[in-house]
Image (cartoon, rainbow, N blue to C red):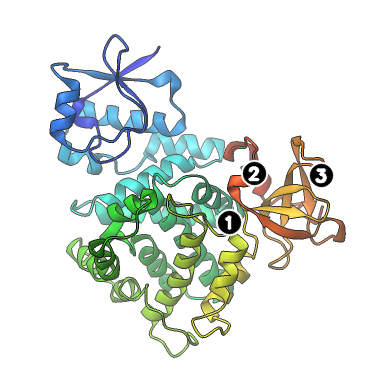
Amino acid sequence: MNLVPVSIDSILIGQPLPCALRDVSGVLLASQGYMVNNRQELELMVGRRSQIYIDADQSDNFKRGYVNRINDLVRQDRELGKIAEVQISPYDNKRAATVEARDEPDWLDLQSQTHALLRDTHGDTFLPRLQRLQAELERLTQRNPDGTLFALMQLSGSEVRQYSATHAMLVCVMCCLAAREVLKWPPEQINALCSAALTMNVGMTELQDRLALQKEPLTPDQTKRIESHAARSVDLLQQMGVENTIWLEAVMFHRAHAPGPLAPRSTGRRMARLIQRADMFGARIAPRASRLPDAPSTAMQACYFDENKQIDEAGAALIKAIGIYSPGTFVRLTSNEIAVVVKRGLNTTTPKVAVLINRHGMVTGEPMLRDTSLAEFRIVASVPYRDVKVNHSLERLLPLTKSTATDRPW
C-alpha cells in the first residue's frame, strides 16, 4: 500500500471523501464516499494522530488530482478556510503542459474544480477562478465540441455526487454552441451568457447537490429556497464583484416561464430563455434518487415546445446545435445494435455512432462506427444509460469524437 500523507486541515468538510483515509499503519479511518459533517467530527475521527494518509496506488485520475491539490495545501501550511482558494485550478502551469501534451482534458478534475468553485461564494478569488474555468470550457468546446458534449453527457447520466457542477458545465456548453453556431450572437454576449449559465444556481449549490440524492419529497423550506435562488444568486454575484448587468439579468430570469420569440426581449432576457431551456434539458436527463431520468431525446423534444405547445425559438436553437441525439447518449439502431453517439450529423436525427453491443446482444471488442443517415443503421429509439450494461470509459471513447481531415460518412 502506497500511503500519501495529508494534513487534517486538508479534508473538505461537507463533501464526500474522494478516497479512503487511513493512519500510518494503513488502518482504515473513513471509507471513500464518507462525508465529514463538521470539524468536531473530523477531530474525533482522527484522534491524537498528527498525520493521516490516503492510498495513492488505488487512486484514479480524480483522486490523484485531489492529492496534488491537498499536498500543495499542506506545503503552504494553509488553514481550513483557505482550502477553496488554494484549489484555484488543477490546471496549473505544469498540469496544463501535461494536458496539452496528451491533448486530452481530465474531465473528472474539471468537474472537481467546478464543484469547489460553486461551493465557495465568499472568497475574493471567485471571479478569477470562474474566468479560468470558463476559458478552459471555451477552449475545449472550440477544439472538439462533440467530445465536450460527449464527456458532459456521460458525466450527467452516470452519477449525481457532483450534480451542480456537471449540470452547470453542460448548460454552459449547450448555450455556447447554440448562441455561436445557430443564433450567431456576438462574442461579448456569448461570454456573458456562459458566465450566467455557470453561475445561475450559485445561490443553491449545496441544496442542489443534496436534492439529487434525496428520496423524500421537497420540504416547504426547500421549495421556498428553490423559488428564491435566482435572486440569491444575483446577490452573491454582486457581493463577489460582478457588475455586468446582462449577466445578472440572465441569472435573475433564468427560471422564468416566458414563451414567445426572442427578438422583443432585452439581451439579458434572451440569454435567460436560452439558459432556461438548456437548464430544463439538463435536469430531465440527470438521474435522481427520487426518480428515473428522461431519455435525452425525450428531454430535448420537451425543450422544443414552449409552455403554449408552440415551437420555442430558444429550444429549437439548442436542438439544431446539439441534435436530438447528442454525443454521449445511447441509441438502438434498426440493425438492433446498441450504440453511443460520438458525433453530430448533417441534421439533428442522423448522428455518427459507435456500436458497443451487437445485434446478438454481445459486447463488441472494439467500437464499430456507423452512419445513421444510412437506412440500415437508422436510429429507432434512445436507450437509457442505466440499461447499457457495458464497461466503457471516456478515455476509450473520446478519441472517436475528434474530427479529422478525412472525416466523412462512414
Image-quadrant location for residue 251: bottom left
Mark 1 and 2 residues: CB-CB less than 8 Å, in contact? no
Seen in the image, is 387 located left or right of residue 64? right
CB under 8 Å between callouts 2 and 3?
no
Label 3 vs label 1, nearer the camera:
3
Nearest to N terminus: mark 2 or mark 3: 3
Secondary structure type for disc 3: loop
Q: Amino acid at mark 2?
A: Val
- What is the CA distance from the residue labelled 2 to the residue labelled 3? 14 Å
Q: Position of residue 288 (x, y in %)?
A: 44, 52
Q: Quadrant of the N terminus?
A: top left
Q: On the image, numbered disc 1 is attached to which residue?
A: 145
Query: Measuring 23% from the left and 31% from the top, which residue is drawn there?
Result: 10
- Across and down, in percent, residue 206 comes to 28, 52
Q: Is residue 409 left or right of residue 113?
A: right
Q: Is residue 79 visible?
A: no
Image quadrant of residue 371?
A: bottom right
Instruction: Please name whichever residue, 104 or 265, is drawn nearer the observer in this view of the structure.
Output: 265
Q: Amino acid at mark 3?
A: Arg
Q: Which residue is mark 2?
A: 388
Find numbered disc 2 in the image and state the secondary structure of the residue it sits on. loop
Q: Residue furthest front?
A: 216
Give percent across and percent down for residue 87. 29, 40
Q: Is residue 104 above or below residue 183?
A: above
Q: Residues within 10 Å of mark 2 (few under 14, many from 20)?
A: some
Distance from Cα at disc 3 to Cα at disc 1: 30 Å
Per the image, the residue denoted by label 3 is 359
- Figure disc tally: 3
Q: Amino acid at mark 1?
A: Pro
